[in-house]
Amino acid sequence: MRYANPKWLNSLGVKVLLAYVAGMVLSVALLLAAVFYLITTKSEILPSMDVAERAEEMAEALLFDSAGRPVGFLDSEDSHPWTYDSLRREISYRVLDAAGDVALASATGPGTAWPSTPATRRLTPGPFTFDFAGVPMYAGTAAVEHEGKRWYVQFAASKRIVELFQTEFALPFMGAGIVLFSLVMLFVFGACALITLRYTLKPLREVSESAAAISPRALHARLRVNAVPAEIAPLVASFNRVLERLEQGYRVQQGFLATAAHELKTPLALIRAQVELTDQGEERDSLLGDIQHMTRQVQQLLLLAEASEEQNYIFSMVDPRDVGAEAVGYLRRMADAANVRLTLRDDGPVAPWQADPATLFTLLKNLLENAIQHAPEGTEVSVTIGAEALTVRDSGPGVTPEQMARMFERFWRGAHRRDHGAGLGLSICQEIAGAHGWTLAAQRMEPGLLFRLTTRPAPDA
């Protein structure tokens, strides 16, 4: 059985953050591995290089007297002279002339770290090693020119003092530094990455919200390209071109619908007039019935085309009770012919609605016509108007759950109507409600059906 990945795993921001964390962890792991290798393998490369660099620094800081003889170092390079006296067996320095004779030394006499052996009189710049009293020593030589003479500065440190500082001081300090560095990377750079991602992905969220808001009534809307990242801009531009083609096709369809309905009205009127002039008979009545049915379909098609175009609406403050009274009065004769009572009620104080009065009348008229067509004889169809909603209730046979899902489909008709309608009335009502930002829903009752129109948008809108 296959399982879908959680939505957060498909998030671009989460993937970038995970890549950042993985990169940080890998970097710290490699750094720790390198340090561990250098410490555990007791490599002599780094200590030798450090000692040689120390010799070069001392050579640059060497001071001379008026006779051109070396006499000491700048304070910055000899700020702790006591260390050479206390640790004379562990660290020391000296200055040699071109012949290899000692001109200046940190300490002299027995016990110093410079035995009188040819191996220590190395006048070639660079690192070297030697043994002193059985202790390995790291040393380095650096050359310096002064008044035409060449001098050699040598610095030496025992292997054991170097390892002591590495294991007791350098390694803990380095470990603490790596931990601090990791925490800084994790929190500081992580926060920067999170803020950057939010700022970068904000245009994408705005584009997504704009795309979700596009409906058949807002096909003219386009997504902004200049606000999105350059990598996403081609996708947004392609989506806008799709919207252009969709709008064009929708306009062509609506235009064809309206044109066809208009073109059919006149021939139907002429045919009706000719049939009415013929002799009485069952064939004449049947033809008139067919013509009336076709005329109603054409009228409903026109209403549907008009309701689908937002520019056809003229909004103003409307008292829904006045519109309700007008619709009830308009359909009074139809209700009387069907032996159905029409009632209009108020559900508390009613404030004016922001609506197009003509289309609100059409919406209520279609709901009432639908209710009258399905209401049994001797029953009641009621209209109840409140501050933010109106309802139309009948006591007919109702609909099944399967039929409920199709009630607002175009050209769908229930099985209990008295006439043969076009199946467009409820679709027109839904279009009008959507244009106003309202919600029209049907609810099964016992008995009958209830339509509720609320001035609040649908929860998922």
Image (tube, grey):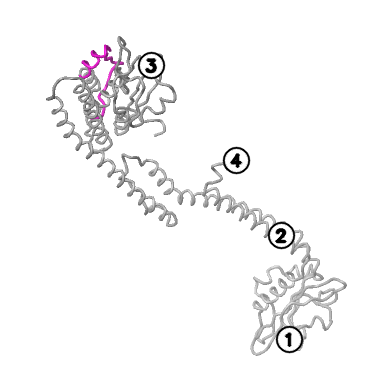
Residue 280: horizontal and vertical position, in percent? 15, 20
Q: Which residue is mark 1?
A: 97
Which span of residues is magenta-colored?
330-356
Residue 339 counted in the magenta span? yes
Foreground of the two, 455 or 66: 455
Residue at x 67% of width, y 89% of height: 149
Q: Is residue 153 shown to the viewer in this render? A: no
Q: Amino acid at mark 4?
A: Tyr
Question: Is disc 4 surrounded by few (<14), some (14 to 19) or many (20+) residues within 10 Å?
Answer: few
Foreground of the two, 315 or 160: 315
Q: Which residue is mark 3?
A: 397
9 to 140, vertically: above or below: above
Q: Residue furthest left?
A: 277
Q: Amino acid at mark 1?
A: Asp
Label 1 or label 3, whichever comes before in sequence order = 1
Q: Which mark is residue 3?
A: 4
Q: Residue furthest bottom?
A: 148
Q: CA distance from mark 3 to mark 4?
A: 44 Å
